[in-house]
Amino acid sequence: MTLDRRDFLAACSRAGITSALLPGVLYTLAAQAQEPASAAKANPLPKITPEMLDQAAILAGVGPFTADQKKMMLDGLADQRDSYEPIRALKMANSVPPAFVFHPMPAGAKPQTRQFVLQGGSPRVAEFPTGSSIEDLAFEPVANLGAYLRAGKITSLALTQMYLARLKRYDAKLHFVVTLTEERALAQAKAADAELAAGRHRSPLHGIPWGAKDLLAVKGYPTTWGAGGFEHQSFDEDATVVQRLDLAGAVLVAKFSLGALAMGDKWFGGRTRNPWNPEQGSSGSSAGSASAVAAGCVGFAIGSETLGSISSPCTRCGTTGLRPTFGFVPRTGAMALSWTMDKLGPIARSVEDCALVLEIIHGPDFKDAAVMVASDFHWDPRMNLHNFRIGYLKSEFDPPPPLKLLEPEPNETADEKKKREDRNAAMKEARKRRDYDRRYELAALDKLRAMGIALNPVELPKLPYDAMESLLLAEAAASFSDLTLSGRDRLLTEQGVEDWPNIFRLARFYPAVEYIQANRARTLAIQQVSALFQQVDIIITPSTQTQLTATNLTGHPALILPNGLRGPDAPKPPKIDDGDSDDIGGPGTPVSLTFLAGHYQDAKLAAFAALYQEATNFHKSHPKLD
């Protein structure tokens, strides 16, 4: 007799089987014997056999099952496999979220809920550089450009035409433009000039040209997500962030590249390049946004981060990026990769510029359910730095442990020896680069102490953050389930072991029970990392992977800013940029530093980081492009 779902689950429980992976594994194993997806209806899936169940149990890490247990399970597993089809037939769009909402605050915590106010003083009055041409302003910060526009020293149209010309000139070298929005931009610039001439000042961004990462929908233009097979995709409504910047009077000039489906810097049009060293990629996935800002081709840009996609390209390209608290900026109209980790934020040439942008784009839109907290953004660059309690991740600044090289294996073949030696050589070079960059990180601590700031050592809680990354991969596989099931994943440019097609396939073997267990571990991470910010207001850290993984999982805000340029004695970059490391730029390229804060303390984070940035002026260095 065929069991219904409730009877089946009860039977599994009696048999001591708790993994929710088995039906999914069985489906996959059965599908391996199938024709392509287009022939599925004509060729129904094979019957599930006890042998299949044995294989699935190995993958799930459960069992082995007795013959009686397997017999009891078979009909129920077949029913559960059949239940996948009606849901798959819905063909849900990427924009449809799951029926749960992630909030990063620990239980009992209360965010600020005052009115949105930017209190950075009166609008800046900046002295226009004597004898400057419009192109001499290409690297000026947004705050200065806004002052020139309000004073009538320049026009938005001239500024827009200058940036469009630079985008066209340098795209051949850096490959950061997916689509120029030229017609839209010129119309917006003319409208901005008319309003400014009439005395209407919408915001500090009024008349400022900007660029959008091409996962943000813009009506009338393609939104490609950087991926083969999506080149002609379009949407009928602008993303919320685009709408808000339009209302602020900002001028959208381009949609910038991202690695395909928000991974890395390789997209269907090639590889976006680092303006400081065009032989290398710009890192990703906000590849074009960081590259274009660094190259002086736009006033600011919007990027996104799920696990490093603002931090990494800002580190590589020497820009300033503000990754907001999760749930601070609505993602409506943006490609979904991970509903519990995706964040939108500004990339600019200064902390102040990032703050001016975040003031415009943050707050609920009543469409993105994750953005429910009406938290204040009260940024004041005149804050007294001595009111801050400052911590630093001590172990991240300490010398790393001795390098453990691979030892020869017994009966090692010549090929195995070569691979081992190559791997050891690569580890030695990576250690040289890390040791070199540490001097900049230690110098930052010295500078802060010289500014009269007491630094308190803190450490991240010891938790398995890397193991929790599977949450992202499972959600990403669900976001793009149709690619895997239809075989359209073959259209993506990158098809290696660490690329999306393979990752999406692997994620289908991730048990639902383990997904929930990882989320429970994530609750511990949120509680314990949040507890650090009861001790200190700001934490300073190298832009390294451990804190990056931890704070993306916990939803804490981060500000990444340039921290100097490597000298001529820096280790030379590797011949091949494999995209795994952001510290391979070589002589004359930027290094970065990261500042962290508590949930919804983005304004406090920006205020302190701005003080450090103005004291060092590293953000005023720019790459030589010609």
Image: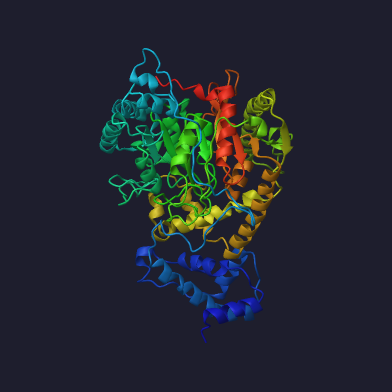
Residue 361: % across, % down: 44, 43
Direction top: furthest residue: 131
Residue 471: % across, % down: 56, 55
Residue 51: % across, % down: 57, 72
Relative to 570, residue 400 above or below: below
Q: Residue at x 29, y 27 (%)?
A: 161
Q: Is residue 462 visible?
A: yes
Q: Is residue 415 visible?
A: no
- Which residue is more in the foreground, 527 or 127? 127
Q: Residue at x 59, y 81 (%)?
A: 72
Dividing the picture into quadrants, the one containing residue 418 is: top right
Relative to 67, residue 449 above or below: above
Q: Quadrant of the C terminus?
A: top left
Residue 329: % across, % down: 47, 47
Direction bottom: furthest residue: 1
Left or right of 166: which side holds 364? right
Which scheme is used to colour this image of the protein?
rainbow
Dividing the picture into quadrants, the one containing residue 419 is: top right
- Which residue is more in the foreground, 275 or 141? 141
- Which residue is more in the foreground, 174 or 526? 526
Relative to 187, residue 306 above or below: below
How many numbered marks are there? 0
